Image (tube, rainbow, N blue to C red):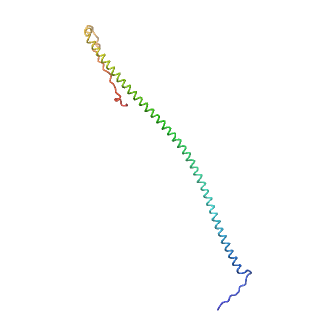
Amino acid sequence: MAAKKTARPSRGRPRGAASASAGQLKQLRATVQELRAKLAQATHKRRLEVRLLGEAKRAREQVSRQMSALRDQGRKLAGELKKALTESDRRHKAREQALAKIAELKAELTRKTEELKRKSHELAELARESAHRARAILQEQPESMQQRPAPAAETEPAEVKPPPTETPSDEPGV
């Protein structure tokens, strides 16, 4: 048997209008949810941007401090390098002057050593000549010397030996 549909009493609204309102309400709820999601997303994005800006600012300040410190350190190192180079140049000049003075002193030492050798040689020659003359005088006048008594020191002529000469190669420091 077929069941009969009983008619429901209407409540004052047409049936098509209620479903249209429900659809609009559903659509409005979906729009509200979308807008809430977009708002939450925008809020979240804004918070991230603010945090990122704060971090960027802190990082920029830190980099600025580091750059300032490095700049100061660079100035200090440049000053030290300039001072070291100046000191190096000064020491180099002093070394060159010292080497020139050493060469000058060596040349003077060589010249004076040669002069001393020459004078020693001349003195040795003069001593030999003097000894020869003394022998010659003693040999020419032996009779007059025998007649008068002479002191013991005068009877025998002393041989004069030249002083030993030193060469620059004998000295340990030259």
Tell me where residue 58 appears, x and y as whole percent.
60, 54
Tell me where residue 79 appears, x and y as whole percent.
53, 41
Q: Depth check: 58 or 30 in front? A: 30
| Total numbered badges shown on the rendered structure | 0
Tell me where residue 77 appears, x and y as whole percent.
52, 43
Is 120 positioned to the left or the right of 89 in the image?
A: left
Is 72 positioned to the left or the right of 164 in the image?
A: right
Tell me where residue 158 appears, x and y as whole percent.
29, 17
Image quadrant holding the C terminus, namely top left
Picture quadrant of residue 52: bottom right
Compared with residue 44, is residue 131 higher up or lower down, i.e. above or below? Answer: above
Residue at the extreme top of the image, as rendered: 147
Compared with residue 133, is residue 118 higher up or lower down, i.e. above or below? Answer: below
Residue at the extreme bottom of the image, as rendered: 1
Picture quadrant of residue 75: top right
Is 24 positioned to the left or the right of 125 in the image?
A: right
Is 93 positioned to the left or the right of 16 in the image?
A: left
